């Protein structure tokens, strides 16, 4: 499908081939402009029966259910679900902290692989894909397009993403909630090093705008274990002040802070119905993506 | 605190090792780029309370562990309530042991202060170690060196005695020893109960000793092992007088001993109700018991009559009370005999001059026995018999070659001679040159129109001493019109000095007996000696008493270490297993030829006066001095090695450090996922 023959370091055709059998489905009805694989809030011409309603003059007679008329001598219109495509907006955190990685790749590199695979799959199934690279603000913003040529622009943008600056994801999410048309699929890839209380407001804002929000929370295993043994001067990757500390001395309190943060974040995503996945970047992104897609597909079929 | 291996203390700076390692560790930090700064900031905000001091505690525990190890290998010593300073190898250890009767007070377990002190010193000195051991006793003997501690402590010369200790003299002996032998670092250990009588804090010797020790080049440390606790339940007994009384009534002669005694008890006991004290009286081995009722702290029994065999004229005895907390003062020995004849020989060339002396000699103190006074003219000296003579008054030319040997023998046997200037000096103005006796010769008469007064005199001892009640003799009231001067090669001891410096009464130093020179005549026109009367009478009577004591066959002696050890003494009664060289310091009855001696503790030993702490400290002011107070019967050593405590402390510090270092577990991933 793609006309892009250029080699991308974050794109693995083998992984895409393996995941291609699993559709990327939204959890909520989407408002697309063409037919697609996702549920729409409107009635349409799909094979999925929706409901009966009484005939009113002007209705298309082809949709009149003659069998029901024969049984009841009344006119009923037979309605079907509409299938539409979606607009997927990928919010990629490119702040300085995303450059951290102790397992051979950084959090940003990990995020790029997930983003590229999902973009490819979305374009392939006819969905429109947009991209917002976020640092202190929106560094790069690509509006959602569904034509395959857009995929090259996406990949070029991803390839050009550089981790630097502080995280302004809270402001960006509020901005995107307003600027993106309603009922879009918002995919966030970030380490989310911000106050969970601020994130709650963002998620509620997105939810209010009827967006389907999914989060890939990327963390390095070292950030969780904090198993450094020597006194260390920690330099803030986002340009803040440095801290000198003996990790052995403060490890217990560090762990307490991490635990408290994760608990608050988990509570926030549950209360705001966000599809949240915490990922340690030493795990296989292929497995993480498969789980993500399968889980969403199961939810859709069970609806 | 002292240490047996103080050199190991040079390793003390090693306690800074954990701190240095900590600082080096801090200095060798790494720089790391970090994304999750919000968690680090949160952790820093939580760094309060125990978490903040935990690292400091760990550092402190590591430091303590090193400190405990260094102190343990330095072999620290504990010494009861007071830490003994010092340390280092001691070259010489001098032991000064108070062996007075008060040190035989029993403590818990029936162990005396002396035994407890000896055992404590044995343990302590065994621990401390020394190259040489020296013991100093009160006997005036030179300090004795021992090769090892066991030999020193087993020495019989460190057993208890009845003599009052003389601490100033013993310290002087120690100083003399150190000055003469110049040993290296020296430790002096004094073991005493701080009784005032033993310490004699008023003695001028203390200041001399103190100055002497300060000038010593080597390091000398003085350690006092004190047992100041006085007995709470103790009684003591002593004989105050013993006389023999022979009476004949209705043709029946009776012979009795009049015994006066005094029993005292401690204040705590005196508060109790009246008690009956059984007193055991032993006369020549035969024992009787009487009960003495006591209501207060002291009771005196006067002239208790004990019948004697009618033929018995002399003997010995002992009184004893039941055992209590100090058995050394529960018995008292005495001897008795018929009083010797009070015979006075006056050699006078002018009886009118010596008339006052005749009168003074012929009336005894109590008037009971009138001495026989024999007056001889110089021409009658051939018939001079000095046997059984209490006093010789010599008022003529000094003895010549014919009479001098007899008189010298008399003096060497303890006789007393009182010389007065011959009248002929007044007439001729000179004594024949070379006529000396005991290195003294009469020079010439000094007469003046103005009467000479007595400027000063010795009221503390000898013939002109104050009375027992403390009243001084009226020597200052004497006025002398003429006196003879003396020419002496001997070092005269002036008992009374006239204004101008000439002596009125002088004593020639002799090993035994008394040789006195009175430079004034008793003639009324020469002095007021006869007119005053009191001074002359008391002087003569005291001289007679001294002569009688020398003549008598029995003597009550106060236990003391005597330079002249009576080699021919034989013990009649008294404690067993004592050194014959210490007979004079051990209570008991001894015999030397015909003479009997009763040796007893001094009256000061029965007093319970303890030297105050500040006075003790004052005696050693300026000297390296440490004091440990102990109790009789105490089983705990005064000096113990306590390295085990420090080793346990080190282990505890390491365990606490290990516990503090255990990292806390936080199941972050599992709990939050």
Image (cartoon, coloured by chain):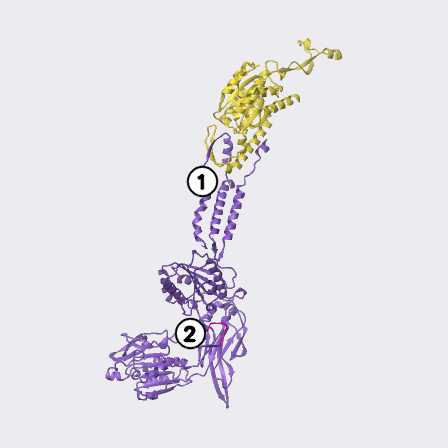
Chain colours: A yellow, B purple
Locate residue A285, reporting x and y percent: 57, 25
Q: Report crowding for label 2: few under 14, some 14 to 19, many 20 or more residues within 10 A (C-alpha).
A: some
Is the residue marked by circle 1 packed among few (<14), some (14-19), or many (20+) residues within 10 Å? few
Q: Residue furthest bottom?
A: B251
Q: Secondary structure at mark 2?
A: loop
The magenta segment is B572-580
Secondary structure beneath disc 1? Answer: helix
Residue B579 image position (x, y, % from top left): 47, 72
The one of B251 and B638 positioned closer to us in this rendering: B638
Which residue position holds label 1?
B23
Q: Which residue lies under the disc numbered 2?
A: B565
Classify residue B390 by image quadrant: bottom left
- Does residue A258 lie above or below B420 as drawn? above
Asked if residue A223 lies left or right of residue B211, the reply is: right
Question: What's the chain of the residue with tag 2?
Answer: B
Front: mark 2 or 1:
2
Q: Position of residue B411 (x, y in %)?
A: 36, 80
Quadrant of the snapshot with the C terminus of chain B: top right
Tags 2 and 1 both on a single chain? yes
Percent coordinates x, y for residue B632 in the rendering: 50, 64
State yes or no: residue B577 in magenta: yes
Residue B211 in the magenta stretch? The answer is no
Point out the tag, 2 or 1, that comes first from the N-terminus: 1
The answer to whether the residue labelled 2 contacts the one labelled 1, judged by CB atoms less than 8 Å apart, is no
> Mark 2 to mark 1: distance in Å?
75 Å
Report whether B518 appears left or right of B672. left
Residue at (48, 62) in percent of width and height = B122
In the rendered view of the protein, which quadrant contains the N terminus of chain B? bottom left
- The chain that hosts pointer 1 is B
Can residue B1 be seen in this snapshot?
no
């Amino acid at each position: 499908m793609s006309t892009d023959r250029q080699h991308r370091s974050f794109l693995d055709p083998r992984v895409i081939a393996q995941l291609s059998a699993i559709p990327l489905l939204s959890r909520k009805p989407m408002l697309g402009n063409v037919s697609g694989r996702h549920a729409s809030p409107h009635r349409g011409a799909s094979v999925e029966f929706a409901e009966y309603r009484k005939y009113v003059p002007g209705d298309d007679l082809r949709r009149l259910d003659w069998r029901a008329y024969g049984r009841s001598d009344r006119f009923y219109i037979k309605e079907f679900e509409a299938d539409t495509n979606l607009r997927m907006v990928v919010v990629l955190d490119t702040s300085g902290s995303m450059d951290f990685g102790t397992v051979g790749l950084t959090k940003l590199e990990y995020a790029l692989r997930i983003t590229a695979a999902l973009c490819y799959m979305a374009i392939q199934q006819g969905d429109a894909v947009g991209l917002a690279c976020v640092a202190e603000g929106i560094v790069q913003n690509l509006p959602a397009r569904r034509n395959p040529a857009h995929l090259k622009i996406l990949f070029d943008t991803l390839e050009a993403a550089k981790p630097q600056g502080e995280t302004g994801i809270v402001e960006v999410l509020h901005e995107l909630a307003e600027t993106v048309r309603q009922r879009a699929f918002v995919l966030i890839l970030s380490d989310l090093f911000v106050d969970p209380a601020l994130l709650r407001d963002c998620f509620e804002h997105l939810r209010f705008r009827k967006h389907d929000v999914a989060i890939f929370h990327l963390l390095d295993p070292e950030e969780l274990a904090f198993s450094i043994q020597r006194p260390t001067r920690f330099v803030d990757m986002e340009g803040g002040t440095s801290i000198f500390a003996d990790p052995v001395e403060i490890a217990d309190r560090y762990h307490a802070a991490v635990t408290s943060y994760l608990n608050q974040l988990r509570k926030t995503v549950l209360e705001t119905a966000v599809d949240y996945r915490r990922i340690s970047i030493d795990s296989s992104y292929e497995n993480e993506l498969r789980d993500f897609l399968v889980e969403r597909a199961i939810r859709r079929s069970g609806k | 605190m002292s240490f047996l291996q103080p050199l190991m203390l040079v390793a003390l700076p090693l306690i800074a090792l954990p701190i240095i390692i900590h600082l080096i560790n801090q200095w060798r930090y790494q720089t790391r780029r970090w994304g999750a700064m919000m968690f680090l900031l949160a952790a820093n905000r939580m760094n309060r309370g125990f978490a903040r001091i935990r690292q400091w505690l760990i550092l402190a525990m590591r430091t303590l562990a090193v400190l405990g190890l260094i102190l343990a290998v330095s072999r620290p010593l504990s010494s009861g309530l007071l830490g003994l300073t010092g340390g280092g190898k001691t070259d010489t250890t001098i032991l000064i042991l108070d062996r007075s009767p008060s040190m035989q007070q029993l403590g818990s377990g029936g162990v005396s202060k002396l035994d407890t002190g000896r055992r404590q010193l044995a343990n302590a000195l065994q621990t401390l170690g020394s190259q040489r051991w020296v013991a100093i006793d009160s006997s005036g003997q030179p300090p004795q060196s021992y090769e090892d501690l066991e030999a020193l402590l087993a020495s019989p010369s460190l057993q208890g005695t009845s003599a009052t200790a003389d601490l100033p003299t013993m310290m002087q002996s120690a100083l003399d020893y150190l000055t003469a032998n110049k040993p290296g670092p020296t430790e002096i250990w004094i073991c005493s109960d701080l009784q005032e009588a033993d310490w004699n804090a008023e003695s001028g010797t203390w200041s001399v000793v103190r100055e002497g020790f300060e000038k010593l080049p080597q390091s000398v440390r003085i350690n006092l092992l004190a047992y100041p606790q006085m007995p709470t339940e103790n009684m003591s007994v002593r004989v105050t007088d013993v006389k023999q009384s022979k009476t004949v009534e209705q043709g029946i002669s009776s012979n009795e001993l009049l015994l006066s005694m005094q029993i005292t008890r401690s204040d705590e006991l005196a508060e109790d109700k009246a008690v009956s004290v059984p007193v055991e009286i032993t006369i020549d081995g035969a024992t009787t018991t009487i009960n003495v009722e006591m209501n207060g702290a002291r009771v005196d029994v006067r002239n208790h009559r004990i019948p004697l065999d009618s033929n018995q004229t002399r003997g010995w005895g002992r009184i004893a009370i039941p055992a209590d907390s100090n058995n050394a003062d529960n018995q008292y020995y005495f001897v008795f005999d018929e009083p010797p004849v009070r015979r006075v020989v006056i050699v006078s060339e002018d009886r009118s001059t010596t008339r006052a002396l005749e009168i003074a000699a012929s009336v005894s103190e109590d008037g009971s026995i009138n001495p026989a006074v024999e007056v001889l003219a110089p021409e009658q000296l051939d018939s001079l018999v000095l046997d059984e003579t209490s006093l010789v008054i010599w008022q003529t030319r000094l003895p010549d070659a014919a009479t001098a040997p007899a008189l010298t023998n008399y003096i060497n046997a303890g006789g007393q001679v009182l010389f007065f200037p011959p009248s002929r000096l007044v007439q001729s103005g000179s004594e024949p040159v070379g006529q000396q006796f005991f290195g003294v010769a009469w020079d010439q008469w000094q007469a003046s129109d103005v009467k000479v007064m007595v400027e000063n005199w010795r009221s503390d001892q000898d013939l002109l001493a104050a009375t027992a009640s403390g009243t001084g003799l009226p020597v200052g009231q004497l006025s002398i019109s003429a006196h003879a001067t003396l020419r002496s090669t001997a070092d005269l001891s002036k008992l009374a000095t006239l204004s101008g410096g000439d002596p009125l009464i002088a004593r020639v130093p002799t090993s035994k007996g008394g040789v006195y020179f009175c430079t004034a005549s008793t003639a009324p026109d020469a002095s007021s000696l006869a007119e005053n009367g009191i001074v002359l009478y008391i002087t003569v009577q005291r001289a007679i008493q001294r002569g009688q004591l020398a003549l008598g066959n029995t003597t009550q002696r106060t236990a003391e270490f005597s330079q002249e050890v009576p080699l021919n003494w034989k013990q009649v009664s008294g404690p067993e297993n004592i050194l014959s060289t210490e007979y004079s310091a051990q209570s008991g009855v001894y015999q030397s030829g015909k003479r009997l001696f009763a040796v007893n503790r001094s009256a000061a030993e029965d007093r319970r006066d303890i030297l105050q702490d500040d006075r003790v400290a004052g005696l050693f002011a300026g000297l390296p001095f440490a004091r440990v107070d102990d109790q009789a019967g105490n089983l705990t050593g005064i000096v113990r090695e306590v390295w085990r405590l420090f080793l346990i402390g080190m282990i505890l510090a390491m365990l606490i450090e290990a516990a503090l270092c255990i990292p806390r577990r936080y199941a972050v991933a599992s709990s939050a996922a």
